[in-house]
Amino acid sequence: MEKNKKIKFPFWVTPKTMETVKEMYKDDDCRSQSEFIEKAIQAYVGYLRADNSPGMLPNYMVSTMKAIVDSGDTRMCRMLFKLAVEMAMMMNILAANCDVTEESLSTLRQSCVEEVKRINGTLGFEDAYRWQKG
């Protein structure tokens, strides 16, 4: 049997299901209701196969998940860039107005590295204030 050859067979559905097909097939860019039903069957078979093979996901799910992750990565990169610019501005203002020796700066950096490791990177301004005040 040819791959693209179609066959005709009896097909029974509820009136409500048929109404849904009539309403939706054009929204999915299908040329006919039969094409819409065939695509629905193929999607369902893919779903069942994915359910039986935990390591396999249907292509539409993989592409959707990839788009979500890519979008999140892009937003995160933009926010990190903006944050880096703000930090650079703040550091330059502080460096211009503070009288700190390189030795005390080095000591402070090492203390901050140890403190941030200890608290798992969740340092807030109040924590730094309490740390500085003793």
Image (cartoon, helix red, strand yellow):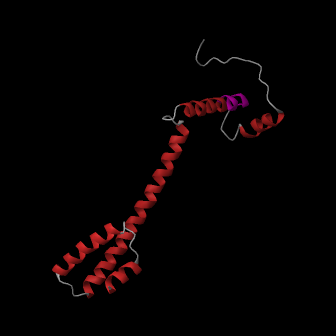
Image x and y of residue 102, in percent: 17, 79
The answer to whether 134 appears left or right of 100 in the picture is: right
Residue extending farthest to the top is 1
Q: Nearer the viewer, residue 112 or 2?
A: 112
- Quadrant where the image shows the N terminus: top right
Q: Main secondary structure of the magenta part?
A: helix
- Quadrant where the image shows the C terminus: bottom left
> Does the stretch in magenta take in 4?
no
Residue at image point 21% right, 78% down:
105
Q: Nearer the viewer, residue 2 or 107?
A: 107
Q: Measured along the vertical axis of the image, is residue 66 above or below residue 35? A: below
Q: Nearer the viewer, residue 12 or 103?
A: 103
The answer to whether 108 appears left or right of 87 in the picture is: left
Residue at image point 39% right, 65% down:
80
Q: Nearer the viewer, residue 108 or 61?
A: 108
Q: Quadrant of residue 112?
A: bottom left
Image x and y of residue 71, in percent: 48, 54
Residue at image point 45% right, 51% down:
70
Q: Which residues are magenta?
A: 32-38
Residue extending farthest to the left is 103
Q: Quadrant of residue 118?
A: bottom left
Q: How many marks?
A: 0
Q: Quadrant of residue 26?
A: top right
Image x and y of residue 117, in percent: 31, 66
The answer to whether 19 appears left or right of 92 in the picture is: right
Residue extending farthest to the right is 15
